[in-house]
């Protein structure tokens, strides 16, 4: 009989998924406000024919809008500058169109525009510790990459890079976007290198959610569906498989959405624990940080679980994913776990994922990286890793 322990699920956005769903944005926006702030990346969306087509549809709905661009990972200063500029202008709705960084910025901007205050009032650990009162502007989130699942989460990750840098979240239940529009056609212009890194991020989020200490039967079902989508569509989306690229894009857009839903409920694990200092101290792009460390982190987790927690349900889950990715259903758990590592190692070697040494990371940086890796993500890893085990993950990828 299925044993169900208590669990809770946070709020989700209204979800519009499917090719062509971007066409729904203008009429949806018209029902939510008349004056929009549109947040995009520097060029990834606005350089396509979709941008003028969207503007035409917005005009047809009688809407007015301002436009701001986000370059790279957003910083607290960038958020404060945008909020300061647009707070007096009576914005009624925010629309974020872009990758995870753009959507994170849009969430923070939508949350602060009604008040006009600094994000540092609320940023976890490094901010002033003031509770956010809620009441953000409504937000429509439109991802153009298949990676972070930010369209389904309540947190905005902000970064300061370099010595003393950090990656911290501004989060509140009310910051979940009102509507997420996931149009797989938007992935057609995504560069292969970006698609590879973002896809590895989505897969990592699904895998870490699946084996998380806070996993539950509902998130397991969602994570498994996303893992199946990655298994079927990742290589096709990259143009490296035998199937249709458009179907691959749809599979990865779906997987990324589910990865965001799952991580918001379960937390993540050691890969994302390491991604925080790797990204803030050394400017390693988030998808690269996840993709390049995933195989080694999975190896270390498996070794630690077998020695210290041999009855952990995570071991059987890792084996199930190994059978899925290798398409070998009849093998025992030990063999399936080895197959999982083999697939992840193959992806690491085959995909355009840089080693950490290319970002100036050396063995002398290991103590600092380890010391800053014990954040919220590391707390839901299926096993508590020792400092030397965390260091071994990074060292293997230098």
Image (cartoon, rainbow, N blue to C red):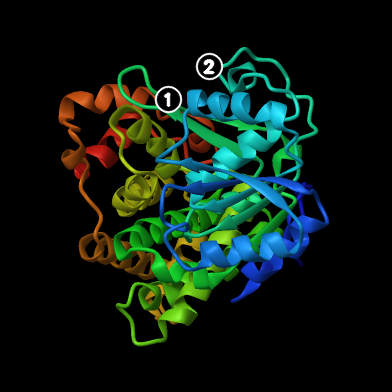
Name the residue rendered at 69%, 28% in the picture. 87
* Image marks 2 and 1: residues in contact by CB distance under 8 Å: yes
Q: Residue furthest right?
A: 31
- Mark 1 Cα within 10 Å, few/some/many (few <14, many 20+)? many
* Residue 238 seen by the camera: yes
* Residue 382 seen by the camera: no
- First in residue order: circle 2 vs circle 1: 2
Horizontal placement of 347 versus 188: left or right?
A: left
| Residue bearing mark 1 | 166
Horizontal placement of 60 versus 76: left or right?
A: right
Instruction: Name the one closer to the observer, 220 or 166.
Output: 166
Asked where in the image residue 170 lies, by quadrant, the reply is top right
| Residue bearing mark 2 | 126
Question: In which quadrant will I find the C terminus?
Answer: top left
Name the residue rendered at 63%, 65% in the picture. 56
SS under mark 2? loop
Name the residue rendered at 40%, 40% in the picture. 72
Q: Residue furthest top?
A: 128
Residue 26 at x, y = what percent?
71, 62
């Amino acid at each position: 009989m299925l044993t169900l322990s208590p669990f809770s699920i946070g709020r989700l956005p209204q979800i519009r998924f499917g090719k062509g769903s971007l066409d729904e944005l203008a009429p949806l926006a018209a029902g939510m406000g008349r004056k929009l702030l549109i947040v995009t990346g520097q060029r990834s969306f606005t350089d396509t024919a979709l941008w003028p087509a969207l503007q035409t549809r917005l005009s047809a709905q009688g809407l007015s809008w301002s436009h701001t661009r986000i370059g790279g990972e957003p910083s607290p200063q960038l958020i404060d500058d945008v909020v300061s500029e647009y707070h007096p202008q009576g914005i009624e709705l925010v629309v974020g169109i872009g990758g995870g960084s753009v959507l994170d910025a849009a969430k923070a901007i939508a949350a602060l525009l009604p008040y006009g205050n600094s994000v540092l009032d609320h940023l976890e650990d490094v901010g002033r510790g003031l509770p956010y009162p809620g009441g953000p502007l409504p937000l429509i989130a439109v991802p153009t990459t298949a990676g972070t699942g930010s369209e389904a989460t309540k947190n905005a990750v902000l970064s300061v890079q370099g010595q003393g840098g950090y990656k911290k979240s501004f989060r509140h239940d009310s910051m979940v976007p009102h509507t997420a529009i996931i149009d797989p056609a938007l992935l057609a212009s995504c560069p292969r290198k970006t698609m590879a890194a973002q896809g590895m991020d989505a897969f990592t989020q699904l895998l870490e959610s699946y084996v998380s200490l806070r996993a539950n039967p509902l998130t397991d079902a969602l994570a498994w569906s996303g893992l199946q989508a990655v298994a079927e569509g990742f290589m096709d989306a990259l143009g490296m498989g035998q199937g249709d690229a458009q179907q691959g894009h749809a599979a990865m857009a779906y997987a990324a959405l589910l990865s965001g839903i799952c991580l918001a409920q379960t937390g993540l694990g050691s890969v994302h624990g390491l991604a925080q200092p790797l990204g803030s101290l050394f400017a390693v792009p988030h998808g690269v940080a996840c993709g390049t460390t995933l195989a080694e982190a999975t190896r270390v987790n498996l070794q630690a679980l077998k020695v210290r927690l041999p009855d952990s349900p995570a071991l059987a889950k890792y084996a199930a994913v190994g059978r899925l990715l290798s398409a070998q259903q009849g093998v025992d758990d030990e063999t399936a776990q080895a197959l999982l590592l083999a697939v992840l190692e193959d992806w690491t070697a085959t995909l355009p994922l840089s080693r950490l040494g290319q970002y100036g990371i050396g063995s002398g940086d290991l103590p600092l990286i380890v010391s800053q890796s014990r954040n919220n993500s590391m707390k839901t890893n299926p096993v508590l890793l020792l400092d030397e085990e965390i260091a071994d993950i990074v060292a293997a990828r230098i």
